[in-house]
């Protein structure tokens, strides 16, 4: 059977630009297609010269076209768009995504059919935000709710590893399909779009911000009760993008007992308040270690200070989570959903109560738990 240019273009419409989240045909990136004796030569115009994901795009193009009957070989070359083409593409994307704009002039995305969106934040790294995000999702799922996790830590993604997700997301007519964990949690991470999960993502702030928005807007989340967003540390572009562009119900701040961590937490709280994002509560992680021999609590990092800090910031205190080697062990194996701890169950339940307070009767989904 002879492969036609039309069939090649149709196959290429399944290839999604990882940075923008739309297929390369729709984006006008397919510059030329030549077919000769079963050999297909394709020229792709990248939106950014030396694009970090160029190899991923080329690989996806080759895989899609090689599946066609009669194709013996596929070669892919790349060029870059002209400034005029980029301006036209930018205008097209603004027309497509510019449904809502915040007072700041920043694009405000639709909430879709997601009941409540919660970002997990901290002013510094190393406090265990990814662990807290994954465990919050796990506990909410264990309660029977439909839950999703968006890994917004683009340059240091952890969620895919924690949940043992390795497959490349597929694309439907409604958008990118998130992967599903063993217990039914939907998850997306930029690592799932890379050919090599150890590849460094070397992007400037504006690109990171756009990718985060696309991981939210171009993913078909379906119906969710909760979407947990794992944010990178600090108070820079990535958190600001989420605060201003994604319709959050609020943020959860993660801290540890050290004075330094609590000082940086103040920055995270003040940032959220400056943009009028509700702070749903403070979680103190690694608050203590339970001795495996006598079950005594050992305060490795000093006395827990979370409750006192929450009072100082005038925010709810959700609870203290122990430093548990089991969390690290299960996360490394991608088995985080097997972890259970009464302390964390209480934290998740406190968060749920804060989110749902006064909102149960207004939920379009009726707050019916998943039947799975």
Image (cartoon, rainbow, N blue to C red):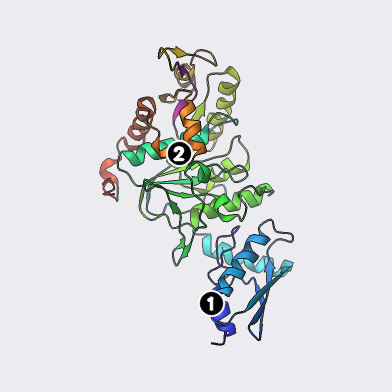
Taking 164 as reference, is 157 left or right?
right
Task: Report the side of 84 relative to 59 (left or right).
Answer: right
Q: Is residue 280 above or below residue 29?
A: above
The residue tagged with tag 1: helix, strand or loop?
helix
* Residue at x 47%, y 37% (from the top left corner): 133
Magenta residues, start to end? 280-291
- Which residue is tagged 2? 134
Q: CA distance from mark 2 to mark 1?
A: 37 Å
Q: Quadrant of residue 337?
A: top left
Indicate the position of residue 94 as horizontal and vertical percent values: 57, 62
User: Please, what secondary structure does the residue beneath circle 2 have?
Assistant: helix
Q: Is residue 188 above or below residue 357?
A: below
Is 155 a magenta residue? Answer: no
Circle on res. 10 = 1
Identified at 29% across, 47% down, the residue is: 363
- Along the viewing direction, whichever of 361 and 171 lies nearer the viewer: 171
At x 47% / y 44%, what residue is drawn? 163
- The image quadrant of residue 12 is bottom right
Q: Nearer the viewer, residue 305 or 164?
A: 164
Q: Are marks 2 and 1 in contact (CB under 8 Å)?
A: no
Q: Position of residue 241 (x, y in %)?
A: 57, 46
Of callouts 2 and 1, which one flags the residue occurring earlier in the amino acid sequence?
1
Please say whether residue 144 is visible from this viewpoint: yes
Compared to residue 64, the image places residue 287 above or below, namely above
């Amino acid at each position: 059977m002879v492969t036609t240019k039309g069939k090649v273009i149709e196959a290429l419409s399944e290839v999604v630009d990882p940075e923008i989240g739309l297929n390369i045909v729709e984006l006008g990136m397919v510059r030329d297609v030549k077919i000769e004796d079963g050999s297909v030569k394709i020229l792709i115009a990248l939106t950014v010269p030396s694009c970090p994901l160029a190899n991923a795009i080329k690989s996806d193009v080759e895989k899609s076209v090689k599946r066609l009957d009669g194709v013996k070989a596929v070669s892919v070359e790349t060029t870059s768009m002209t400034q005029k083409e980029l301006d036209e593409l930018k205008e097209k994307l603004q027309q497509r995504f510019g449904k809502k704009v915040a007072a700041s002039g920043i694009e405000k995305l639709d909430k879709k059919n997601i009941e409540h969106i919660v970002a997990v934040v901290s002013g510094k790294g190393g406090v265990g935000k990814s662990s807290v995000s994954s465990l919050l999702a796990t506990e909410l799922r264990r309660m029977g709710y439909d839950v999703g996790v968006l890994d917004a830590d683009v340059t240091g993604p952890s969620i895919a590893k924690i949940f043992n997700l390795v497959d490349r997301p597929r694309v439907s007519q409604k958008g990118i399909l998130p992967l599903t964990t063993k217990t039914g949690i939907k998850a997306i991470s930029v690592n799932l779009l890379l050919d090599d999960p150890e590849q460094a993502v070397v992007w400037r702030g504006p690109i990171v911000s756009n990718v985060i928005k696309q991981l939210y807007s171009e993913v078909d989340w379906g119906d969710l009760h909760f979407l947990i967003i794992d944010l990178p540390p600090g108070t820079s572009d990535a958190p600001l993008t989420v605060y201003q562009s994604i319709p959050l119900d609020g943020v959860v701040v993660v801290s540890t007992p050290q004075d330094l961590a609590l000082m940086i937490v103040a920055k995270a709280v003040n940032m959220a308040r400056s943009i009028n994002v509700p702070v749903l509560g403070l979680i103190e992680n690694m608050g203590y270690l339970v001795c495996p021999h006598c079950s005594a609590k050992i305060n490795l990092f000093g006395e827990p200070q979370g409750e006192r800090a929450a009072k100082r910031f005038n925010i709810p205190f959700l609870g203290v989570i122990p430093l548990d080697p089991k969390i690290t062990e299960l996360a490394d194996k991608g088995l985080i959903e097997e972890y259970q701890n009464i302390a964390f169950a209480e934290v998740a339940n406190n968060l749920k109560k804060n989110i749902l307070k006064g909102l149960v009767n207004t939920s379009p989904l009726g707050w019916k738990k998943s039947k799975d």
